[in-house]
């Protein structure tokens, strides 16, 4: 039993001569954070947070936050700030690909590390499914005037199955059928995932440059939305301010949380960061602060322009563009939709960047097959896992639903964040003298408060998310004992060195 919690020495984690190429600076990391955080959350899930959600049977899944969703964002900013401080300490000490997986391997042991690595699939690969679907919604808004794809080619099967909108749900009966099965596939969502995968195969620096361009476009689009929206605010829309009470604020924070995982994506880039001891904390904390301010301002403007009830995601999947359209600003709506397409492309790029590097780290440790750890000789990109991730995410995007995917991503990410907070405390106890380029201030209240805050936000997720998460963990643990336990490099090294 003790061997299940064997920890990987930090000295082994710190440098690998055959590892990835260090090409990213602090500015690149901040842009990666904005690229990941400002995306489907602010352009898509913000509507669900404001209006609440009901399913096709009329059951309330989550209460509306209404205009009080600005407090949802502030709550998230506080929770993530606590977790981000913990990430910054561990990332500066362990500048290796793998994010929370690598940190937990060094602090809480192999079994916990495997669980987190498996859990992070929910954070990145599954989260990207939701982003791709939201991208497809804005793509339809952007191209609606000249590109008329059949609705069954732009709507996933589970989106139709779970929608409370009779028109969308009715596609199950009207869509073309093959062998009696309705053909409902989201072609734009799958296509953008495959395109982003091709970009990532070119290399980390090239991917970072593409991300920087898209981040600039998305910030211009949000600036346009705020400037135009401020001229159309109706104070009456702020009443009632919190229609769902604190429950609505809590539920709103829980669904938008996935958007805040950008600072975790930064930590997956640790092995490709120049001077990681300095640049990682700057990227993590700086990116989070900028993004929280943007979310609060956009949420305030959006709910002032239109009633929160009009932002129902089953009716309007593109809330920012809809708000501009409904107030007579068609040109601005088209430009914001264009910005949203660029914005969510950047999110896809950052998430697709992160997932292969976690697989790479796990394969290097023997917990996944060796082929998953292959790095391209010229680009130094883990190309096998990049391709596998792209194909799987594209396939799920064809038929998936954004809402249920958000919940899975959120619960997995929050669980990982809570364990990272605990890991900082464990490492302070087990290795107190190791140099820490960045130290968490007030370590006990910050770490315990961060873990508790993550669990509190998890509590705001619907019961279905907990059930699915439980099954996901059970499958992951079974896979560990089938493969990872037997092939662990750390375990084999320990067995070889024992007399």
Image: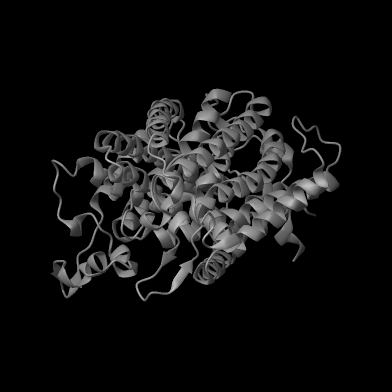
Which residue extends farthest front?
Answer: 236
Note whether 109 is above or below 338 in the view shown: below
In the rendered structure, the answer to whether residue 113 lies left or right of residue 204 reads right
Instruction: Measuring from the top left, give residue 4's x and y in whole percent.
Output: 70, 61
Q: Who's the residue at 24% across and 46% down the image?
A: 140
| Quarter of the rendering occupied by the N terminus | bottom right
What is the basis of the colouring in this image?
one colour
Note whether 165 is above or below 321 in the view shown: below
Note whether 400 is above or below 383 in the view shown: below
Question: Which of the two residues, 469 or 17, is positioned nearer the viewer here?
Answer: 469
Q: Quadrant of residue 185?
A: bottom left
Question: Which of the two residues, 324 or 463, is positioned nearer the viewer here?
Answer: 324
Does residue 44 appear in this view?
Answer: yes
Question: Which of the two residues, 242 or 132, is positioned nearer the viewer here?
Answer: 242
Note whether 486 is above or below 294 in the view shown: below
Q: Who's the residue at 51% across and 36% down the image?
A: 294
């Amino acid at each position: 039993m003790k061997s299940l919690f064997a920890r990987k020495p930090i000295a082994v984690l710190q440098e690998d001569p055959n590892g990835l190429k260090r090409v990213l600076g602090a500015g690149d990391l901040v842009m990666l954070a904005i690229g990941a955080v400002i995306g489907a959350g602010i352009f898509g899930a913000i509507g669900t947070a404001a209006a609440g959600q009901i399913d096709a049977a009329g059951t309330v899944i989550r209460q509306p936050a209404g205009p009080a969703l600005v407090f949802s964002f502030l709550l998230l900013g506080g929770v993530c700030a606590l977790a981000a401080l913990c990430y910054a300490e561990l990332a500066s000490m362990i500048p290796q690909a793998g994010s929370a997986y690598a940190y937990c391997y060094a602090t809480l042991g192999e079994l916990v590390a495997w669980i987190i690595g498996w859990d992070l699939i929910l954070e990145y690969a599954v989260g990207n499914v939701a982003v791709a679907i939201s991208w497809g919604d804005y793509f339809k808004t952007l191209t609606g005037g000249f590109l008329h794809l059949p609705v069954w080619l732009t709507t996933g099967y589970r989106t139709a199955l779970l929608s409370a909108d009779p028109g969308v749900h009715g596609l199950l009966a009207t869509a073309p059928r093959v062998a009696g099965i309705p053909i409902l596939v989201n072609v734009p969502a799958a296509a953008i995932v495959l395109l982003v995968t091709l970009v990532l195969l070119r290399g980390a620096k090239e991917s970072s440059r593409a991300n920087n361009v898209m981040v600039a476009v998305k910030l211009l689009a949000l600036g346009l939305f705020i400037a135009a929206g401020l001229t159309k605010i109706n104070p009456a829309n702020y009443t009632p301010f919190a229609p769902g009470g604190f429950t609505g604020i809590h539920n709103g924070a829980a669904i938008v949380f996935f958007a805040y995982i950008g600072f975790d994506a930064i930590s997956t880039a640790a092995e490709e960061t120049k001077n990681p001891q300095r640049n990682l904390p700057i990227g993590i904390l700086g990116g989070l602060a900028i993004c929280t301010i943007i979310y609060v301002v956009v949420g305030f403007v959006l709910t002032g322009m239109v009633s929160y009830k009009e932002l129902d995601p089953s009716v309007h999947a593109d809330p920012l563009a809809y708000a501009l359209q409904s107030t007579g600003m068609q040109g601005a709506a088209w430009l914001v939709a264009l910005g949203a397409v660029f914005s969510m492309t950047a999110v896809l790029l950052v998430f697709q960047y992160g997932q292969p590097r976690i697989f790479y780290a796990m394969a290097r440790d023997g917990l996944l097959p060796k082929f998953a750890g292959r790095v391209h000789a010229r680009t130094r990109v883990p190309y096998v896992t990049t391709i596998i991730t792209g194909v799987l995410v594209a396939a799920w995007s064809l038929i998936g639903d954004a809402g249920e995917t958000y919940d899975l991503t959120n619960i997995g990410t929050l669980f990982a964040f809570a364990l990272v907070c605990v890991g900082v405390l464990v490492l302070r106890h087990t290795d107190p003298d190791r140099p820490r380029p960045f130290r968490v201030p007030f370590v006990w209240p910050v770490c315990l408060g961060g873990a508790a805050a993550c669990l509190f936000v998890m509590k705001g997720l619907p019961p279905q998310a907990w059930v699915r998460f439980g099954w996901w963990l059970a499958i992951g643990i079974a896979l560990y004992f089938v493969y990872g336990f037997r092939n662990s490099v750390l375990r084999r090294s320990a067995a070889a060195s024992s007399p």
